[in-house]
Image (cartoon, rainbow, N blue to C red):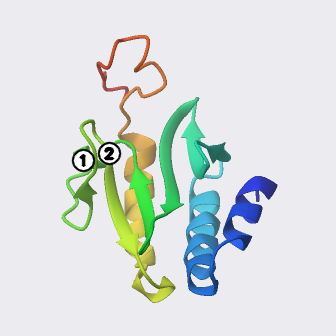
Amino acid sequence: MNQEINDYNDSQTSEDKKICDLLSSEINSFLHEAESKIWHRHPVWFLDGNPVAGYSKLKDSVRLLFWSGQTFEESELQNEGSFKAAEKRYTNAEQINIDDLKRWLEKARNIQWDYKNIVKRKGVLIRLK
């Protein structure tokens, strides 16, 4: 695992650390080809330089985020922001459904919008896959 992500997880409270450790383990395992790093102070996984999945500690939960998640057609994911991102929030590790997570990660691999070039395109997103 990326040491920066491990340090991020270790800095969380006990329950949030369990959530973060489980998420990072599953994401690393499933998206083994992805580059992972701390980006904007949060763990994020990239495919070909494009952010696809990550998580962050919020005040009352840990938010799992998929940059192209609004196009996954998954009722468990809630729209986030004004682009194509969608999220799922957790307050304990037992809430994480591994089958759902793996399905979402597969969609993150296969359904992507080009966030890498969003600034160059002045906020316009183009679908890559």
* Residue hosting label 2: 85
- Asked which secondary structure carries label 2, the reply is loop
Whether 31 is drawn above or below 114: the answer is below
Q: Position of residue 29 (x, y in %)?
A: 63, 62
- Amino acid type at circle 1 is Gln
Residue on which the image places disc 1: 70
- Tell me residue 86's x, y (percent): 30, 52
Nearest to the observer: residue 21 or residue 42: 42
Q: Is residue 119 above or below residue 16?
A: above
Marks 1 and 2, the one that precedes in the sequence: 1
| Residue drawn at the location 24% of the way across and 44% of the way down | 71
Query: How far is mark 1 from mark 2, CA to CA?
Result: 6 Å
Name which residue lies at 24% across and 47% down: 70
Dot 1: element: helix
Count the marks: how many? 2
Q: Position of residue 126 (x, y in %)?
A: 31, 21
